[in-house]
Amino acid sequence: MHRRGFLAALGAALGGGPVMAAGMPGQTLAGAELWTRLRSGGHILLMRHAATDPGVGDPPGFRLGQCSTQRNLSARGRREAQATGVALREGGVPIGAVWSSRWCRCLDTARLAFGRVQPEPLLDSMFEEDSAARHTRVAQTLARLSALPQAANTGNLVLVTHDVNIRALADEAVAPGGVVVARMHGGALDVLGQLDLKPAAPS
């Protein structure tokens, strides 16, 4: 079983949240400890776009820059994206750059949550790419992230992208609008945990 999967299963068996293995790469943090780390800045938040209209992928005739040809955020998704931004602000989490896939549902999620966005082709959906193309894109993305400063004064970098990309980059499954918290370690993403932004953020 994957290490994070084992820790999650153990946590569930004990009747609590994820088990913490602090102080080493691969640790899983939860609750107040994860929020405390985020307030210090220098982390990477991989956010899946919020809930969309029903469907998988995009309709025939999809075109970048033309939202009417794409699968877009639902009314619920728009509310969830706004709520995510509110939760992070009220939780005292400093937000640095906000990068996004050029798909409209990701750009809209970023704008609704953070009020700003930088389109980033590396985060575009990998859904229709073969394994070789995905491998290349993952390597390019990790190389770019490795070159960035991770000091606290940079805030937390937000990457708004797709489920398939987050799975490829961080080996994590995340619900629409969900957020994976990670740091770069040895050229790879070290996942610290996931934020559950449904409840109010801790004070």
Image: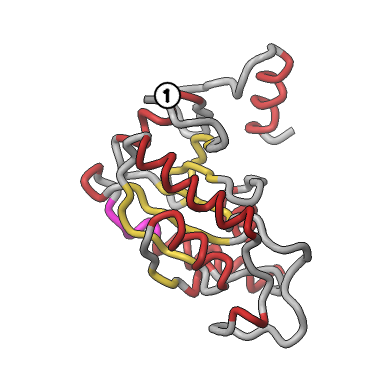
Confirm whether residue 25 shows in the render: yes
Magenta highlight on residue 127: no
User: Please, is residue 44 above or below residue 56 in the view?
Assistant: above
Amino acid on which the number 1 mark rests in the picture: Glu
The span picked out in magenta is 145-149
Q: Residue at x 63, y 85 (%)?
A: 63
Left or right: residue 107 versus residue 43 is right
Left or right: residue 143 versus residue 162 is left
The percent coordinates of residue 56 (x first, y second) are 77, 66
Image quadrant assignment for residue 183: top left
The percent coordinates of residue 158 (x first, y second) are 42, 54
Image quadrant assignment for residue 37: top left
The one nearer the camera, 17 or 88, is 88
Left or right: residue 26 versus residue 1 is left
In this picture the colour scheme is secondary structure
Left or right: residue 129 versus residue 116 is right
Q: Residue at x 36, y 64 (%)?
A: 116
> Which residue lies under the disc numbered 1?
33
User: Please, is residue 14 above or below residue 4 in the view?
Assistant: above
Image quadrant assignment for residue 32: top left
Confirm whether residue 184 shows in the render: no
The one nearer the camera, 111 or 21, is 111
The local secondary structure at tag 1 comes to helix
The main secondary structure of the magenta stretch is loop
The percent coordinates of residue 104 (x first, y second) are 56, 72
Kindly give the residue lying farthest to the top in the view shown.
14
CA neighbours of label 1 inside 10 A, class few (<14), some (14 to 19), many (20+): few
The one nearer the camera, 16 or 115, is 115
